[in-house]
Amino acid sequence: MLQLQLGLTKTYNLFHTRDLASDAVAKASKVVALDTEAAHAAILALRQRHIEMDNAVLKAYGWDQEVDLAHDFYEVDYLPENDNLRFTISPDARREILQRLLKLNHERHAEEAAAGLHDKKPKASASRVKKKKLADEVNESEAPYVTQELSL
């Protein structure tokens, strides 16, 4: 980013460009005497670092032998249709990881609940307590317009 004099958005726009060419990097950068080949290589290296980070996280969970991330360019369904192409893990890998994380979350919650770390009844939030206190203080005969939906 320093070399190219680019912020995060422009850097990651390049990162997610499928057929990234040196001239596209040069065009995005405001550096006059830019080494375009080195700049292009830096964006490609950033992609490689993302792959390495994703693989390290997968290994930390012990899933590295079971899930193939298959990094490539994919259209992601949670972004606008005209800007949804991203360099990321495959949709199948994404679904598998999300399912595993959900299962792990449920297992951890069950362990914590068994250890008595979760109350059965949620505590009232501070804003709910304030609203109730204020509503109790208001005499309905003096202010008939006050309701349970009192907002602070």
Image (cartoon, rainbow, N blue to C red):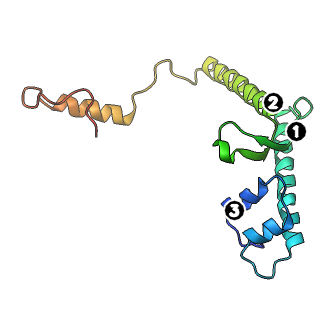
> Which residue lies at the image location 63% right of the left edge and 20% below the top edge?
115
The residue at 24%/32% (across/down) is 133
Query: 90 or 57, which is in the foreground?
Result: 90
The amino acid at mark 3 is: Lys
Compared to residue 97, the image places residue 83 above or below, namely: below
Q: Residue at x 58, y 20 (%)?
A: 116
Q: CA distance from mark 3 to mark 2?
A: 28 Å
**Where does the image place residue 125, in percent across and percent down from the top left?**
40, 32
Mark 1 / mark 3, whichever is N-terminal: 3
Task: Check disc 2 and report the residue beneath it.
Answer: 92
- Relative to 41, does residue 131 appear above or below in the rendering? above
> In front: 134, or 45?
45
* Quarter of the rendering occupied by the N terminus: bottom right
Give residue 24's position: percent from left, percent from top: 79, 65
Q: Amino acid at mark 1?
A: Ala
Q: Which residue is mark 3?
A: 10
Amino acid at the residue labelled 2:
Asp
- Check whether the beta carbons of the residues at disc 1 and disc 3 lie within 8 A of each other: no
Residue 90 appears in the picture as rendered: yes
List the residue tagged with mark 1: 70
Q: Residue lying farthest front? A: 82
The answer for how far apart the CA atoms under marks 2 and 1 are is 9 Å
